[in-house]
């Protein structure tokens, strides 16, 4: 069966009495060129263990299973059990676990199902939970790379640099843990049902060591979040409002020491500048 053929997929789903759920972000790929391109970007080797989140009918899963050593696929929707049992029957290197990937212990599941080989993530993510899923995948610290399809707008936010409208706390979080690269776009007509927005495939190469030195990661991210929480405020106003232990004069003095104006806004500071600022402002117990 061709799992990217619109008619065959529709017939398969009808046979199983399946109805698409919008709240589960169910837009299934039906363009033959896309699964192979995603897997190409992931750079999979025969010994890799791949974690996929949200297999749908399994069109990307099958592509991953053909290229990697083992595939673990996490699916929340139990109604897809019969469908996946049928479409993935020919593969002996795929485990499908029905669970909520947002709540799951990803490292423990990978240890159990992928074993002792390099782990990579490759998935067409459910768009409604992209941010918590990507945050968990990045923080897990056990994946070499994360190649995922997300909304184009989210991919642009993740890759954005200072001084752009897309740049924000999530750009800095992603860039702290990984080096992101926007690979290619996928238009709405490549899915059933068609989403309203364009999608994009993003590859994040997870860093071995952090890109800058900070005294406390939690404090660094607290400064970043505070700076972007009130984007229109100056950085001293936004950060002193977000972190009660910090007063405006000390933030202004720290900015001065970095050669930055007290009227600066968070969106103009680079990751290295946020790190330097957090080094100057940190004292134990503050956040
Ligand atoms: N990989 C398939 C494809 O490319 O055609 C389907 C991708 S579809 C965008 C997202 C999939 O994620 C759906 O199968 C949906 O049921 C599943 N899903 C949604 N929320 C989930 C969650 N929290 N944990 C695991 N899977 C989830």
Image (cartoon, rainbow, N blue to C red):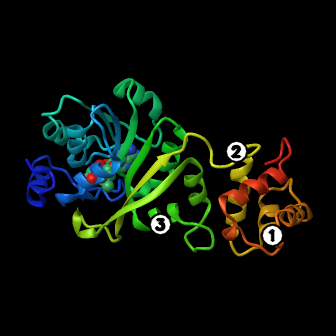
* Cβ atoms at labels 1 and 3 below 8 Å apart: no
> What residue sits right under mark 1 in the picture?
260
Of mark 1 and mark 3, the one earlier in the sequence is 3
Camera-side mark, 1 or 3: 1
> What residue sits right under mark 2 in the picture?
217
Which residue appears at 47% of the width and 66% of the height? 156
Mark 3 and mark 2: Cα distance apart in space: 24 Å
Label 2 lies in ligand 1 vicinity (Cβ under 8 Å):
no
Label 1 lies in ligand 1 vicinity (Cβ under 8 Å):
no
> What residue sits right under mark 3 in the picture?
156
Query: Helix, strand, or loop for circle 1?
Result: loop
- Count residues near mark 2 (Cα–Cα under 10 Å), then give few for <14, some for 14-19, many for 20+: some
Query: Helix, strand, or loop for circle 2?
Result: helix
Of mark 2 and mark 1, the one earlier in the sequence is 2
Mark 2 and mark 1: Cα distance apart in space: 22 Å
Mark 1 and mark 3: Cα distance apart in space: 27 Å
Q: Residue 63, percent across and down?
A: 21, 45
Q: Residue 52, percent across and down?
A: 34, 42
* Cβ atoms at labels 2 and 1 below 8 Å apart: no
Which residue appears at 68% of the width and 52% of the height? 221
Q: Residue 235, percent across and down?
A: 77, 68
Q: Quadrant of residue 110?
A: top left
- Count residues near mark 1 (Cα–Cα under 10 Å), then give few for <14, some for 14-19, many for 20+: some
Camera-side mark, 2 or 1: 1
Left or right of 168? Residue 60 is left
Q: Is residue 133 visible?
A: no
Q: Residue 190, percent across and down?
A: 23, 65
Give the answer, above or below, for where 110 lies relative to 218.
above
Q: Nearer the viewer, residue 272 or 77?
A: 272
- Count residues near mark 3 (Cα–Cα under 10 Å), then give few for <14, some for 14-19, many for 20+: some
């Amino acid at each position: 069966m061709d799992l990217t053929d619109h008619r065959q997929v529709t017939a398969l789903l009808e046979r199983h009495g399946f109805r698409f759920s919008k709240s589960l972000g169910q837009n299934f790929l039906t363009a033959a060129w896309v699964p192979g391109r995603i897997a190409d970007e992931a750079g999979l080797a025969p010994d890799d263990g791949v974690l996929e989140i949200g297999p749908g009918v399994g069109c990307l899963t099958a592509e991953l299973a053909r290229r990697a050593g083992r595939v673990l696929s996490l699916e929340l929707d139990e109604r897809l059990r019969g469908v996946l049992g049928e479409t993935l029957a020919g593969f002996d290197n795929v485990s499908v676990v029905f669970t909520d990937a947002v709540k799951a212990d990803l490292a423990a599941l990978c240890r159990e199902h992928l074993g002792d080989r390099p782990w990579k993530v490759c998935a067409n993510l459910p768009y409604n939970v992209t941010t918590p899923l990507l945050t968990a995948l990045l923080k897990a610290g056990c994946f070499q790379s994360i190649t995922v399809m997300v909304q184009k707008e989210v991919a642009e936010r993740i890759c954005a640099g200072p001084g752009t409208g897309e740049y924000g706390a999530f750009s800095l979080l992603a860039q702290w843990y990984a080096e992101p690269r926007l690979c290619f776009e996928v238009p709405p007509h490549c899915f059933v049902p068609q989403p309203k927005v364009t999608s994009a495939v993003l590859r994040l190469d997870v860093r071995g060591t952090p890109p800058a030195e900070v005294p406390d990661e939690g404090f660094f991210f607290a400064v970043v979040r505070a700076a972007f929480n009130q984007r229109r405020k100056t950085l001293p106003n936004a950060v002193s409002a977000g972190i009660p232990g910090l007063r405006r004069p000390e933030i202004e003095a720290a900015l001065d020491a970095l050669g930055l104006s007290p009227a600066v806004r968070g969106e103009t500071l680079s990751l290295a500048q946020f790190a330097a600022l957090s080094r100057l402002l940190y004292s134990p117990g503050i956040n």
